[in-house]
């Protein structure tokens, strides 16, 4: 429900069966919904993990050639404990949507260049750094998903006076 989406997720401190199952569930749900990605709390998970549909960002993943141990022949990759550690100066406003509130599209201002720190199952707890400076849509996506993990919805960025059309019963994907 909407309350779940406003709760900050917990950091992952170890890789265990629960984490593997959560990532598997995120990928299956992501494939079924055909979205750009999905955060753990959107499916009731409590850990700081999101998945990304690489087919939609194929140019980026091919250009970074397996950053973070990722193979480019998979359709989803995961980010554990992601954190934005640096932002560029430029921002842009663009329309965003969310699988958790599918009937709403809103203009949201986001940075176009970011640097993200994250971990993966493959070599946890090693941290990876990804510079996202050539694909503003991917930078927007990462910010959107990290907001989810921090209990922030995209409509929370909108002036409260303009939020009259956000339904109180907005709910997460079941």
Image: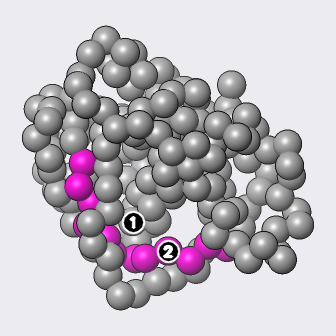
Question: Where does the C terminus fall, quadrant-wise?
Answer: top right
Q: Which residue is mark 2?
A: 110
Q: Which of the marked residues, 2 or 1, is nearer the chain's N terminus?
A: 2
Position of residue 124 in the picture relative to residue 172 (left or right): left
**44 or 113: nearer the eye?**
44
User: Can the viewer see residue 113 in this picture?
Assistant: yes
Q: Residue at x 82, y 75 (%)?
A: 162
* The stretch drawn in magenta includes residue 155: no
Residue 135 on image: x %, y %: 35, 69
Position of residue 120 in the picture relative to residue 96 (left or right): left
Q: Residue at x 25, y 31 (%)?
A: 13
**6 or 148: nearer the eye?**
6
User: Can the viewer see residue 34 in this picture?
Assistant: no
Magenta stretch in the rendered image: 107-118
Residue 81 on image: x %, y %: 31, 43
In which quadrant of the rendered view does residue 2 lie? top right
Task: Decide: is 88 above or below 52.
Answer: below
In which quadrant of the rendered view does residue 155 lie? bottom right
Question: Where does the N terminus fall, quadrant-wise?
Answer: top right
Q: Which residue is mark 1?
A: 139
Residue 173 on image: x %, y %: 67, 32
């Amino acid at each position: 429900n909407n309350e779940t989406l406003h709760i900050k997720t917990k950091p992952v401190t170890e890789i265990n069966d629960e984490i593997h199952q959560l990532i598997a569930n995120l990928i299956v749900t992501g494939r079924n919904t055909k979205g750009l990605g999905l955060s753990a709390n959107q499916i009731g998970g409590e850990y700081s993990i999101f998945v990304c549909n690489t087919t939609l960002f194929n140019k980026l993943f091919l250009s970074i050639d397996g950053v973070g141990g990722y193979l480019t022949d998979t359709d989803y990759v995961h980010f554990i404990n992601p954190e934005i550690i640096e932002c560029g100066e430029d921002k842009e406003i663009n329309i965003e949507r969310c699988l958790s509130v599918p009937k709403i599209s809103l203009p949201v201002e986001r940075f176009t260049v970011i640097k993200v720190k994250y971990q993966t199952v493959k070599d946890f707890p090693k941290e990876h750094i990804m510079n996202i400076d050539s694909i503003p849509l991917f930078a927007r996506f990462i910010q959107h998903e990290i907001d989810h993990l921090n209990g922030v919805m995209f409509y929370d960025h909108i002036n409260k006076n303009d939020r009259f059309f956000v339904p109180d019963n907005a709910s997460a994907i079941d």
